Image (cartoon, grey):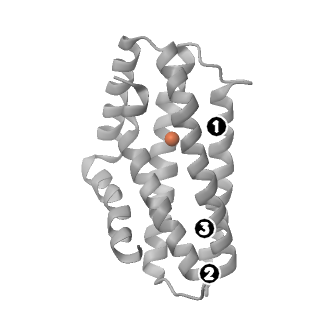
Amino acid sequence: MKTADLLKREHDAILDFLDVLESISRHMDSGGDVPGEDLSIILDFIVSFISGYHHVREESIVFPSAENAGVLKHNGPIGVLLSRHHTLQGYVRLMEDALMHEPFHREKFIKAAEDYTLKARSHIAEEIDEFFPLADKKMLPAAIEKLAMELEQFDITVYGVSRLDELYNIPVLLKGAYS
Ligand SMILES: [Fe+2]
């Protein structure tokens, strides 16, 4: 088992979502409208799934397991990934802020969504190309098995399977409407 496989389903869902977010921001940039309800769904996926689920799983379970196996945090790859999460959060705040106004701040939302899309894609690529291969080298098979169990436990106790299914379905629904 490889560490990247443990997060493949969520990374794929996020990449699908980012494709949709890109289509939506382009559509808005060329003057198209997006219903407020869909913008709320977009924000729900970013806040509840990407930040509240995926980043939390990485920060509280995956990164500490890799750190235990010798992947460096301070001045090392884990520190870099944590700083990327922090940067992404900045764009999330800008999107939240843009949508809080009535009517919402369209240009601010489009710019933050575009920046978020680019940064999130390159962040996932750096995890897949650099971090996971390094974690696989450092972690023993038993440590990877333990990590898999902890991630599974997290899914059950934190969100529960039905809420996760609902979140996983958001990119699928949006894809049907916007691509
Ligand atoms: Fe990730």
* Residue 108, position as x, y percentages in the image: 69, 74
Residue 96's tag is 3
Image position of 120 with respect to 153: above or below? below
What residue is shown at x 58% (from left), y 13% (from top)? 70
* Relative depth, front residue between 70 and 153: 70
Residue 134 in which image quadrant: top right
If the image is split into quadrants, where does the N terminus sit? Answer: top left
CA gap between label 1 and label 3 equals 21 Å
Residue 163 in which image quadrant: bottom left
What residue is shown at x 63% (from left), y 29% (from top)? 78
CA gap between label 2 and label 1 equals 31 Å
Q: Secondary structure at mark 3?
A: helix
Q: Classify mark 2 as within 8 Å of ligand 1 or not, answering yes or no.
A: no
User: Which of the two labelled residues, at mark 2 and mark 1, occupies the earlier sequence position?
Assistant: 2
Residue 105 visible in rendering = no
What residue is shown at x 36% (from left), y 76% (from top)? 177
Residue 38 in which image quadrant: bottom left
- The residue that label 1 is drawn on is 82
